Amino acid sequence: MIYLDSAATTKPSETCILAMDSALREHYGNPSSLHSFGLDAEQTAERARKQIAAALGCEPSALTFTSGATESNHLAVRGAAAVYGKRRRRVVTTAVEHACVRAAFDRLEEEGFEVIRVSPREDGRLYAEDVAAAVDDSTCLVSMMLVNNETGAVLPAAEAFAQIKREHPDVITHCDAVQGFLKLPFTPEKLHADLLTVSGHKVHAAKGIGALYHKKGIRLKPLLTGGEQENGLRAGTESVPLIAGFGAVCAELSGTAAARYEAVSVLRQTAAELLSAIGGVTVQSPPDGSPYILSFSVKGLRSETMLHFLAEREIYVSSGSACSKGKQSGVLQAFGIRQDAADSTLRVSLCAENTAADIAALAQALREAQVRLVRKR
Ligand code: PLP
């Protein structure tokens, strides 16, 4: 089995599984309980909070646990707009965000906010100055991702947020950093982000756990109420096992980000070369994007057809964004990719466990797909 879909989700690491197992078996108290067994569970969660904070480069108290990036993004966008958007009714985002951020802004639009969605220019690149130019005195919030999940494009969030903070210090900045966390070097402070989203299952932890970083002093209206957990920002008993697993992964991986980046860069280069050598294949990811994601189109073959052809050979890739279940998000088109190319796009996303042999097998299977499927039509 060759797994090339790590941007959709990753294989939980052994360290994560062991930490979860121990939390489930031995630390199953309710962290809010006042007895010592509750305290034990709380300490397990707090240890993990410290591990995640250390990996992110922030204070542990700046992190709120959530069920994943979708919830973190909604809490950030809708929670900040509810507090800071009473008079300033304009909010700014980009046209290439993940579906969950787009949905959060759609909700704000329904509530009467003016939503500005900044698109990439004709060259397919999103410019920091275009995002900053969309911000005016009536703006309360800007949200911009760090790494695009469909193409791997690295967005100039740091430059945009720095300019926005210089020109409009009261504007709240949020970054969906899901595809950059533990892969690219950044801290919320270096990005000038007041709010920042990360997700566990994209970094070899389990599904159902994420965190939202919020800078000290930033207020948010909670989405979930009815409990004082997470400083009143997110009611509901914390999932200590999921949190423990996420923390363990962060401790495991935070020291190896640079080495993994190097290894994955070599793989991506190999993949780009091998795939480009196949007739009809066009690499769509920008050369200066994250090496973890490679998007390409195969002329004359539909994404779903190729995806199933590869899956029959136990090679797992994605057609566009996995969250959209085969439905197109429009993000590739926003990056300037033509509709026919978007219809035949595959996304390969890597992790450090992938090998050159995985890439060679993918290239071989694609050549085969061209011969078999193109001839059939
Ligand atoms: N944001 C980005 C950039 C993503 O790639 C994803 C998942 O694909 C999400 C948010 C949603 O993450 P989660 O599954 O943790 O809700």
Image (cartoon, grey):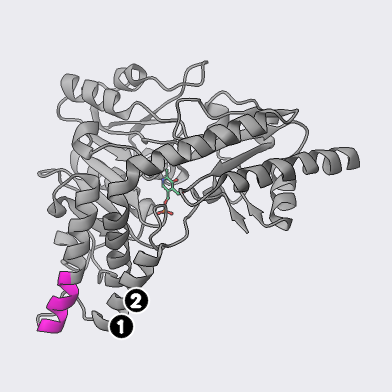
Tell me which segment is drawn in magenta: 35-43
> Can the viewer see residue 107 in this picture?
no
> Can the viewer see residue 108 in this picture?
yes
Queried whether the magenta region covers residue 42, the answer comes back as yes
Secondary structure state at the residue bearing disc 1: helix
Q: Residues within 10 Å of mark 1 (few under 14, many from 20)?
A: few
Specify whether tag 2 is near ligand 1 (CB below 8 Å). no
Q: Can you name the residue that lies furthest to the right here? A: 376
Residue 284 screen position, x and y as percent: 58, 28
Queried whether the magenta region covers residue 352, the answer comes back as no
Q: Which mark is residue 21?
A: 2
Q: Is residue 124 left or right of residue 146?
A: right
Residue 334 drawn above or below residue 235: above
Quarter of the image where one finds residue 21: bottom left
Q: Which mark is residue 142?
A: none
Residue 249 screen position, x and y as percent: 32, 59
Which amino acid, mark 2? Asp
Specify whether tag 1 is near ligand 1 (CB below 8 Å). no
> Residue visible at 34% across and 61% down?
209
Q: Quadrant of the N terminus?
A: bottom right
Q: Is residue 263 left or right of residue 33?
A: right
Quarter of the image where one finds residue 223: bottom left
> Residue visible at 26% across and 56% down?
251
Residue 262 drawn above or below residue 18: above
Residue 198 screen position, x and y as percent: 32, 49
Which amino acid, mark 1? Arg
Query: Mark 1 — residue?
Result: 25
Q: Are marks 2 and 1 in contact (CB under 8 Å)?
A: yes
> Residue visible at 31% across and 38% down?
175
